[in-house]
Image (spheres, rainbow, N blue to C red):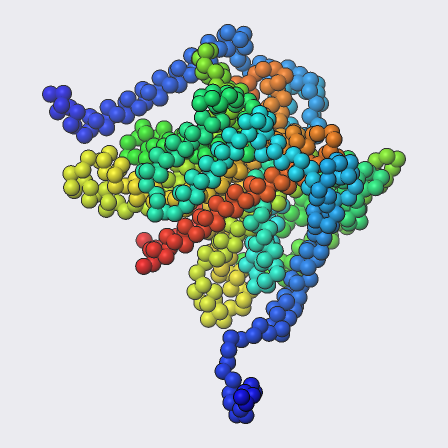
Amino acid sequence: MISALLDNRRFRSWGGQVLLLGGFAALLAWLVSNTVANLHARGIRVGLDFLSRPANFPISESVLPYDPSDTFLWAYVAGLGNTLTISILAILLSTVLGLVVGLARRSKHPLTSGVAGVFVTTMRNMPLIVHLLFWYALATIALPAPRQAFNPLPGVFLSLRGFYIPSLQLDTAAVAFLCAMGGVLALFAYFRRRFARTWIGFAIAIVIAVALAAVIRPSFELDTPQMKGFNFTGGLRLSPEFAALMLGLVIYTSAFIGEIIRGGIDAVPLGQWEAGRAIGLSERHTLTKVVIPQALRIIIRPMTSQYLSTVKNTTLALAVGYPELGLVVGTVINQTGQAIESIALLLGIFLTISIAVSLFMNWYNARVALVEAR
Amino acid sequence: MTAIDMNPPIGHIESPGPPRPSRRSLIRLFFGDFAASCLTVLTAALLISMIPAVNWAVFDAVWTTDDPSACREGGACWAYIAAKFRFIIFGVYPPQEQWRPLLVMGLVLAMILASLSPRLWGTRLVYAWVVAVAAMLVLMWGGVFGMTAVSTSNWGGLPVTLLLALLSLGLGFPFAVFLALGRRSVLPVPRLLSVITIELVRGLPLVGLLFVASILLPLLLPAGWSIDKLGRTLAALTVFAAAYLAEVIRGGLQGVPAGQIEAARALGIPSWKAVWHIVLPQALQKVIPPLTNTAIVMVKNTSLVLIVGVFDMLSASRVAATDPAWPSPYVESYVFVAMIYFLICFGISNYARWLESRVQARSYR
């Protein structure tokens, strides 16, 4: 009877699954009971009420306005704001640089492809954290004091106190103007098929821009940093932490993105190029109308995972002391001892970002994917 | 003897030997058309802008000196690396015992050399690795065979980096196999558990996992259990490696034709035996080249342990640079460490390329 039961396929598979689930539940229960006992023994109270207390610690730089008298919750939001800012900036800049690197590697020019190849090989084979520490050391030790600041381009000053670059001062009218023009361009992009010629659309856009500018009079002022006393005033100051983080992250990521782009273009069969030429398309049209649309489909998947790992890699910023979410969480744990809640928050936020990005990229992937004949 | 006329007779046509590299084609390659000239100028400008860095690293550098103040001016201070070499490589391991970590690194190198040729791959090699890693740990710990005991808080430098990479990959691998099999299972419970575990770990930054291991793990375990910092870090790295390895192994499992398991079923082989003896060996053979990629990622990721205060090679180099006798040579420290990481990772990736070309050559036969 029992051996007959054991030989039954369905019984075995269901029995096994119940055992597995039970074991997993038992493991979880064991961990939770340990935690409860440990927390009780150490007198730690778990709860989220600390979030509304004042944080009382400074955050050295924040995109969102932050003050030590703000709450812990706002400290987390400020940290998250910094994380998202560096993520987006790093992704944008490294995509641009990566495109240059990838195309340079495909170049027929031996010098260009050689330099790009050496760049990719060296950058990819070193840990990101070494990149960050290297740039941070360079920015905080090797650079001169503000008075003798290194001046590579007009208006750009590199010194121990940070990098100073010219900034664009926009008044509200200018912001409104830029937003309106963005909207107009988006509309034209959406309705581009309606125009017989592209230049008609351009002409209309320019006419609208001139008319709009005449009405609301936007002001764009370039604010360049000036030496005043012991330091610079004006312009935009990038702290050494931010500069090192951006440099390291962008250089490291662009090497990976360059390889993804090169791989995507190389993966388009040679026959596609030849077919494009055979039907009389110019080299440029073969690339833009035949090869790139197909390469994009190949690139999307690896690019998504590269973007996601870039977002996750921003947590390494705590090695150079840039106050992103990870550093804020570490500080809060030191200040309050609320480790479980803080780490759960950190993990929860990163999981949300991961899931959101992959959902978006899946949607985009489904949009551009080839509908294959069945 | 009459002198032999070396000149060819008139009318003799010289055989066309290999074409000599012509100067004109090089010029045409670099300045043939507008685009090529632009690229040449741009790349040359980029290379010229590197000259100060080269001057710093080579021509103005101080290569040998016993006097730290000689490094105050000018270029890189490579003499500092020579002076701190032992510290960066071995960390705070007791100096008179440093032959042990040296032996450990020798063992790692010997085992890697022994595993290079696919001809030697097999269960025996796996056993040899287990024995070798056990020997490495005994050597590091000591306390037996007349070696003084060295606690893990005194381990440091390159051996820690190597051991963390090896152990996280080795310990993560069995878990990864089970996770991959679970994810491909037709049964809902193992599939769901595997998917959740893999996606959870892959969705999190390693720094987050290291936080969990160093701060939360002591809370999750019963009061009496204590795992030292190195062990907790290793646990985080192992979980991380397992999730990433599982995805690679899943790729290999997908590559095994369904006919294999159907054939096994037709022969009356029980399904777990079919998976263990027929599907897994074929899948694992397929994934060895992509696994080297994960190995590179893990070698690079061991450097993150610096964040939770484990004394690996990168931490050692950072601490070495704090010596006030030298003029804060952080940049030199990091360049040196980066070169060691580069040699390891570049070696692995070239090996992977060689393996892949071998696999391709075989499949075309």
> In x, y percent, where is residue B296?
49, 41
Q: Quadrant of residue B75?
A: top right
Residue A176 in the image, given as x and y percentages of width and height: 71, 42
- Residue B303 drawn at (x, y percent): 56, 34
Q: Is residue A44 something that shows in the picture? A: yes
Q: Tell me the quadrant of the picture where the C terminus of chain B can be found.
A: bottom left
Q: Who's the residue at 21% across and 26% down the image?
A: A12
Q: Is residue A169 left or right of residue A72?
A: right
Residue closer to the observer: B304 or A318: B304
Q: Residue at x 48, y 37 (%)?
A: B106
Q: Furthest-right residue in view?
A: A229
Q: At which x and y percent is residue B292?
A: 44, 43
Q: Nearer the viewer, residue B360 or A191?
A: B360
Judge left or right: residue A229 versus residue A333. Answer: right
| Between A175 and A262, the one nearer to me in the picture | A262
Q: What residue is shown at x 42% (from left), y 39% (from top)?
A: B111
Q: Which residue is depicted at the point 58% across and 46% down?
A: A123
Q: Identify the image quadrant of residue B207.
A: top right
Total labels: the figure holds: 0
Q: Which residue occupies the extreme front position in the image?
A: B1
* Residue B8 shows up from this direction: no
Q: Is residue B74 above or below residue A208?
A: above
